[in-house]
Image (spheres, rainbow, N blue to C red):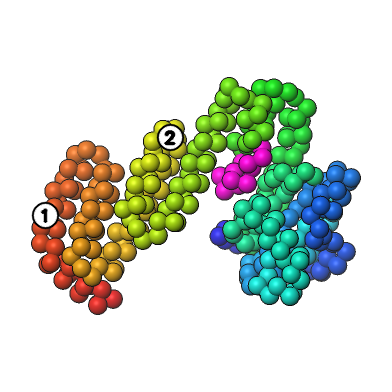
Amino acid sequence: MQRVFYTTAAIAAIVMATPSHGAEWMTDFEAAKAKAKKEGKAILVDFTGSDWCGWCIRLRSSILDTRAFREYAEDKFVLMEVDVPKNVNKIGAELHARNREIANRYQITNYPSVLVLDADGAVLGGFIGGRDTIEHVISPLNEALTNKEKAAKARELTGVARATALMEVYTSLRPELKPYFRSMRDEISLYDPDNTTGIHTEIDDTNRLENLKQQINAAGNNRKQALQHFETALEGASPECAATVRAMRMEYLERAQNYLVMTARTEADVLELKAIMLLIAEYSNAAEAADLRREIETMFADPAAVLKTLKAKQQAQ
């Protein structure tokens, strides 16, 4: 979550702002797209949980529903709310089901999420998570509007030139937004069948990492299976993707190590901890890794003694 200090100007804007009663938050996605196309605007979609998500409620009340934001947005955006409250009756079962479908379509897992779309529903930008000031809302929205203009100019081109221009937009995105740009990736690949821009490698890497995350979640506490998924993901990966996979694997190993230190109950747990520590050691250079392996072998020479020490530490905490 991004945390920032309020500026004097921002405090004044929030304190003096009044609710934007004139701002229309649409709930019909097709109608919002039609309105955006007719008026030449982008669509700002607020994915919110209005009765359970504190940051969602705060974002609307302190920023999105203020006069200052309305004045900024009124000539740029069609406003669209996709509310997924816990109380289905708050918006009705039919709208709740439609909103769920839209959230799933755009793979929304974090709330609030604010996406900027073109009139066809393709993502142009936005931000994930709460924001404390109107400046930190407007900045990513302006980036999305810039993407809108660049993408429109790119689509005046054809062939590889079009793909190259769209790739410039894609590579400028904040990393957390790239998963939302599937349609743009597909469009670039369509106009670049020979992978001149590297988009096919990018798509393969993105799919590889997304599949890996799903596999790790599915593996749960089966660490042997999870580690095998990491090894499989490295096969045929680009250098950049392989580096990301190795970093993810290291993070996974460190979490597993900490978990076993806090929960070890049997000598089998101790031996698993040893195996994980040996894998972590491999991330050091050759000389350091060799020294670490020797230290670990010595440390775990008596698993029963290690287990006794760990249990004593757990009880002391």
Mark 2, other Cα within 10 Å: few <14 / some 14–19 / many ≥20: some
SS under mark 2:
loop
Query: Residue at left 43%, top 35%?
Result: 237
Quadrant position of the N terminus in the picture: bottom right
Q: Is residue 316 above or below residue 236?
A: below
Secondary element at tag 1: helix
Residue 181's quadrant in the figure? Answer: top right
At horizontal 51% and vertical 46% (from top left) the residue drawn is 210
Return the residue nearer the eye: 88 or 85: 88
Whole-percent x, y for residue 22 in the image:
88, 64
Q: Which residue is mark 1?
A: 298
Work out how far the residue at label 2 is from the one at label 1, CA to CA, in angstroms. Answer: 36 Å
Q: Is residue 82 left or right of residue 233?
A: right
Please give the name of the residue rendered at 82% of the width and 49% of the height, measured from the top-left corner.
33
Q: Nearer the viewer, residue 302 or 12?
A: 302
Residue 179 highlighted magenta (yes or no): yes
**From what the image shows, is residue 233 above or below residue 267?**
above
Res 169 visible: no
Residue 114: x %, y % from top left = 68, 55
Is 9 on the left or on the right of 275, as rendered? right
Q: Which residue does the image show at 41% across and 33% down from the upper left?
A: 236
Report if residue 10 lies within the magenta region. no
The amino acid marked with disc number 2 is: Ala
Of label 2 and label 1, which has the lower sequence position?
A: 2
Q: Is residue 205 above or below residue 316?
A: above
The kind of residue on which mark 1 rests is Thr
Identify the residue position indicated by label 2 in the image. Answer: 237
The residue segment tinted magenta is: 173-184
Give the main secondary structure of the magenta stretch: helix
Q: Quadrant of residue 150?
A: top right
Crowding around mark 1 (Cα neighbors within 10 Å: few <14, some 14 to 19, many 20+) is few
